[in-house]
Image: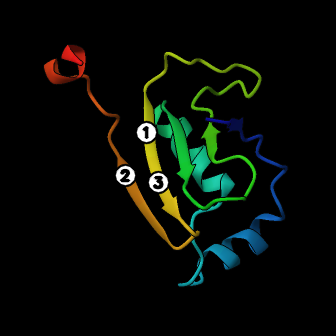
Amino acid sequence: MTRTVIKVPPMPPWDNYLQHMLKETTWADTYIIRATALLLEMNIQIIDIAPNRGPNTYTYNGDPNPETFDEARETLYIGVTNNTHFQSLLPAESTDLDQES
């Protein structure tokens, strides 16, 4: 699985950004996802199942230092289908049946 750590670009002018985000059809963007990761102090990993789109996993760093990435930090997993449906995901847990095979 390919993982891309997202580096958030510089913010646009604040007033323009807020007006854009207030629109009912506007979804969370890289700024909101990064802010959420920082607030929760978690990495956020978005897994895109659309084929032929380049990297299929995007990770937003929950560390305030954008140059630091802690693999051990708790991660919130979100799946996306064609940029239209987002779903929280739970990692598969190992079971006794998995270990027997």
Residue 52's spot in the image, x, y percent?
Answer: 72, 59
Dot 1 crowding, Cα within 10 Å, few <14, some 14–19, many 20+: some
Mark 2 or mark 1, earlier in chain: 1
User: 58 or 48, which is in the foreground?
Assistant: 48
Please tell me the numbered disc located at residue 79. Answer: 3
Image quadrant in which you'd find residue 101: top left
Are the residues at dot 3 and dot 2 in contact (C-beta closer than 8 Å)?
yes
Q: Which residue is mark 2?
A: 88
CA gap, disc 3 to disc 2?
Answer: 6 Å
Dot 3 crowding, Cα within 10 Å, few <14, some 14–19, many 20+: some
Amino acid tagged 1: Leu
User: 57 or 98, which is in the foreground?
Assistant: 98
User: 74 or 66, which is in the foreground?
Assistant: 74
| Element type at mark 1 | strand
Question: In the picture, which quadrant includes the N terminus?
Answer: top right
Q: Which residue is mark 1?
A: 76
Could you tell whether 19 is left or right of 28 in the image? right
| Element type at mark 2 | strand
Are the residues at dot 2 and dot 1 in contact (C-beta closer than 8 Å)?
yes
